[in-house]
Image: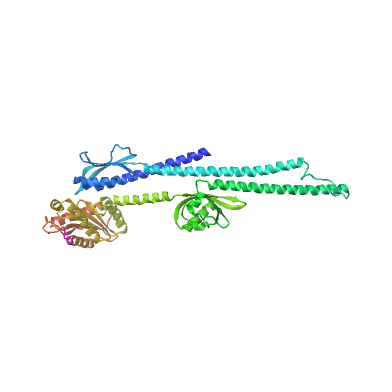
Amino acid sequence: MAVVVVAAETHRIWALRIDRMAVLQQKAERMADVQAVAMSRLLFDYDREGVAILVKAMGGDPDIVWATVMGEDGKIFGQLRDAQMPAAMQVDRMVFFRQGREDIPVGTVRIGFSAEAADRDVRHSVQLSLYGTVAMVLALSIAIVWSVRRVTTPLREVTHTLLQLAQGSQDVQFSGVDRPDDIGDIARAAEVFRRHAREAGQLGEERAAAQALRESEEWLRVVVDNMPVPVVMIRRSDSRVLFANRQARAMCGQDFDGFFVGEFYADPQDRMRLLAELSQKGFVAHFEALLRRVDGTTLWGMISVVPTTFRGEPVLMAGIADISDRRRMEEELRQANRKLAALAVTDGLTGVANRRRFDEVVVSEWARARRERHPLSILMIDVDFFKKYNDELGHLAGDDCLVRVAQAMQNKARRPADTVARYGGEEFVIVAANLDGQQAYTLGEELCRAVAALALPHPATPFGVVTVSVGVASLVPVAALSADDLLRHADEALYCAKSNGRNRVETAPA
């Protein structure tokens, strides 16, 4: 039995280790993708200061051991700690910069990750397993001792009875007690004496048994009270606490005895689910619930329950482990994963959707529009003379310009069915579901006016301020076409808008 338990625990811990390493691998892949997107522009511009800031920011992640950013020529552009430091896994990402429709390789991001978080979870699981094993051993010891006493006490009583019988007292049956003569009187007197002796012996045995029971209960109380895990005894008839050991009192409150366990659950439904599981299985193991202490504060507990009897009364023995730290770490991990997922589909400069997110949206919206037979529109937007803007005012001003333009587009395309994305460089794209060609054209005009209204000075344009050109394409999807066809039409319309003088909207021919 012990070998089976140890083997099962070893397999579970091994599986936990594999699971945690898989989670770390997923995190490493997402982190490498995010850093590659974030550093593409910086490597393209040879912005060492910007790269240094991002590399330093990675130092705040406890799972990152080292990080190296190299240019296209293989020379180190930025570094966080020595890459020779040992790491559990290493992830490399080529970094490309999107210029127009061309992906230009600009460098490599290499990150080494530590397995400390995964090992910490495994160590915590091993610790919990150790506690559970100790509790099981103590419970088995108590059960064995209790069983021995239940067996030896009757044997001791039988031995005592046989000894009394061998001495001719108590259980000896006297003959002649019904005789009316002196012999009968003697026999009757002897019988009375035998009954009195037996009653006296029974009284002594009862007193000895009561003393043994008190000693046994006291011994059991001392053992349970000094266990390293919280243990609670609950009376089943009224669900009140009969006994709580020192660890349970420290965890739940000193005034725990007599406490109604229904008030111990932050959610009453958790108690109903625990009782249902107890009724179905006959025991409860590793049941997790949010619990409320006597003072009103809460903690996450993992509860195991077995039914038994105490002084002839049905009771429940419950062991409770405080897993608040584990639950908090799990929630922090979920939040971190959500943030990483958001970063993976968001343009790091403008805050709108990135190219990856656009590719996902246009495919899903095309399928939905075809299924529901409603129009789908795409607006391709290009910032006019943006290269000259960068050359005249610098890249910082250019980045600020792109951010302002993206905000203006988001303010106009505000429907839940609208997705604004950065297509690459100074190009943006809007996917507008259930919007026909005329409505999309009107939206394009609003975008032109909104960007011009920003009044961002542009010394190298005939308009004097930053403007955009918009190409619009709209159709109802059919089997003979694809989303690429719609995107190509929008791109052709954008080319017409730029060829016809810019700062205007052009529609793809039907």
Which is nearer the eye, 139 or 452? 139
Q: Residue 506 sits in which quadrant?
A: bottom left
Which is nearer the eye, 127 or 11? 127
The extreme right residue here reads: 181
What's drawn in magenta, residue-wise? 452-456
Q: Is residue 66 left or right of residue 456?
A: right
Which residue is rendered at x = 84% and y = 47% of the image? 187
Q: Residue 402 sits in which quadrant?
A: bottom left
Percent across and percent down for residue 444 are 20, 60
Quick one: quadrant of the C terminus?
bottom left
Percent across and percent down for residue 253 are 49, 54
Which is nearer the eye, 375 or 120? 120
Count of marks placed on residues = 0
Which residue is rendered at x = 33% and y = 40% of the image? 89
Which residue is rendered at x = 48% and y = 51% of the image? 250
Q: Is residue 324 left or right of residue 309?
A: left
> Most prominent secondary structure in the magenta stretch?
loop
